[in-house]
Each structure stands twice: as C-alpha cells, then as structure tokens.
Amino acid sequence: MQINLKTPLLLWHNFKLYLKRFGKTGPETLKTDSTNSSSYMAGIHIAFDKWEKKALGWVPLKSFKIYRYQAILIILVVLITGTVRIISTETDRKNAPVQKYAYSIALTFDDGPYPEYTQKLLNILENENVKATFFVIGRHSKKNPLLMQLIASRGHEFGGHTYNHQNINKISKQKLLAEMQDTQNIIEQTTGKKTSLFRPPGGKYNKKSLNFISEAGYTTVLWSILPKDCEISTTKEDLIATVLKNPKNNDIILLHIGTRVTLEALPEIICSLRLKGFKFVTISELMDGISAQAKENRYVYLKKT
C-alpha cells in the first residue's frame, strides 16, 4: 500500500516557495523562534531532508520556517478535504475512489403518502443526504400527487404496496394484478417514474402468489429489520435499539411514513449506522449486490424479523 499525499503536499510546496522567497532559513532542528517575544505566534523551524517528488519537480529545502497558525491551517485543509487516500500498489488507478463505508443498508418506508408526515420525513432524509425507497399505496398516491412529485424530486425510489392495502393471499390473481398495475400506473402518472418493485402489505404472501408476482414482471421486496414503528407501544428508544441491535450488510429496514416515533428516531438511526460503517442505498442499488439467483427469480427474499 502507498499513501497518496499529492494535494496536501502541493499545499506544503506552495508554502515552501513562499517561505523560500520571503522567509528565513535556520538550523535543521525543531525549535521555537523566540527572537520576537512580543509575538503571540511563535515560529517553528521544521527540517525537511527528503521531501522531493519527481512528478512535482520539487527542490528539497533543508530548512524553512512556518508559523503555528499556518501549520494549523494546512492540517485543517487536509482533514476537511479528505485528500489522503489509500491506494493499492497492485492497481494502475492512481486516483482510485476510496470506499468510505464498508457495508450497504436500505431504508424503506411503507404506506402513504400522508400530508402530515411525508414532508417532515423528506426533510430529515434531505438533511442527512439519504436516498430511500417508498412503497406507496395507490389510492393515497392518487389523492396526493404533489407529495408524490416531491418524493420524486428528492431523488427517492418508488415501489408499489397495492392500491387498497389488501392481503394478497385473500384475493384472486386478477384482483392482485389490478392492484399492482393500478398502483404502478399512478406512480408513473404522478412522477414520471416507472417501477417494478412490489411489497405485499403485512408481508403476507405464499409461494403461489410469489410466483405469480414474479411472472407478472414484478420484484417482491421484503425486509430483514422490522422495528414495528407502527405499533402504539413502540417508543423511540425501542425503535433505535431494534435497528442497531445487529445490522448486517445488505439489510433492508422497514419503517412507515405515518408515524411520529419514526420521525423522532430517524436522525439518530442514520447517524449511528454511518458510524458503524453503513452507507444508505435504494433497493435497486442494493439489488446490484444480491445473488444472481435472486435476480433471476425477481424477488428479494429475506428472512423477516
């Protein structure tokens, strides 16, 4: 491995050129310049013996002088811009991107959209720079086209959740197909976005319905983390504890649009998961990493909790 310090070293180089022209040279030791006791910014002599980069054509300087505030400024620039990159010596990609997060996780929201909660939820997601997948109900989407357009304008993804939030095991194939198609059409009419993602209400399905949904060209999306935020007894602390208990790579979190406790817990959930090394992705992005068998079967089949 090697460290790419090009940008921060360019900053040092610029300072050296400045100091070479206007500064004073001194002994090759690290010491405080006390020649001006009235100055609150004492100088520091820093010895550099082998700082030469062929690509930059640097001329090594044995010694130069900088002040504390200059050193602090450069350190802050390096920290803020994140210009120190780890690059494998086995690749020719000298500017290979850094994977900041080791794991992926998907936030999904069911039901709605609802006027009272959707705007607040979208504001939280925008403030946290998170993209999510919304499994909306067809009749609610038809009633709230402006909210649908707002969700789309924020870059989020859509999936269907039936038109009337029905138990798909208790309706005919024809009725199920109509529920899915009507919802899909409403999403496209209000947002211009097409989707083939589908989540059965309550997670209720059987092998027969699952196969029928797949044959109709839809991808069934379930979940792996269920905090039960729609239950009255669930508190903010309960919700956070459930999500953070044991999150794994490619987990799917199921939350709901119309719950106040979700709005209260969401910022802390997002922050905590990022600290654990998770990046937030949409279902489509997450599916890029699932097995070929799951893609072929057109469903994301995960054990429900």
Image (tube, rainbow, N blue to C red):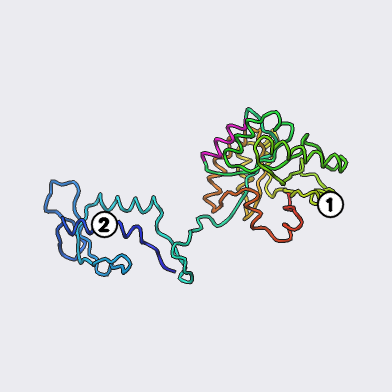
Crowding at dot 1, Cα within 10 Å, few <14 / some 14-19 / many 20+, comes out as few
Q: Circle 2 — which element?
A: helix
Q: Residue extending furthest left? A: 35
Crowding at dot 2, Cα within 10 Å, few <14 / some 14-19 / many 20+, comes out as few
State the quadrant of the N terminus.
Answer: bottom left
> Which of the 4 quarters of the picture holds residue 183?
top right
Q: Is residue 305 above or below residue 230?
A: below
SS majority, magenta = helix
> Which of the 4 quarters of the picture holds residue 11?
bottom left
| Magenta highlight range | 117-127
Q: Is residue 252 left or right of residue 74?
A: right
Q: Position of residue 288 (x, y in %)?
A: 64, 56
Q: Amino acid at mark 2?
A: Asn
Residues at marks 2 and 1, CA–CA distance in whole angstroms: 67 Å
Q: Position of residue 93 (x, y in %)?
A: 47, 66
Q: Which mark is residue 189?
A: none
Looking at marks 2 and 1 on the same chain, the residue that comes earlier in the sequence is marked by: 2
Q: Is residue 84 left or right of residue 163?
A: left
Residue linked to disc 2: 14
Q: Position of residue 161 (x, y in %)?
A: 74, 40
Q: Position of residue 226 (x, y in %)?
A: 69, 45
Residue linked to disc 1: 207
Q: Nearer the viewer, residue 246 or 193?
A: 193
Magenta-colored stretch includes residue 61: no
Q: Is residue 106 above or below residue 292?
A: above
- Residue drawn at point x = 39 percent, y = 51 percent: 81
Q: Is residue 205 left or right of residue 126?
A: right
- Residue drawn at point x = 45 percent, y = 70 percent: 89
Q: Nearer the viewer, residue 149 or 76?
A: 149
Q: Amino acid at mark 1?
A: Lys
Q: Circle 1 — which element?
A: helix
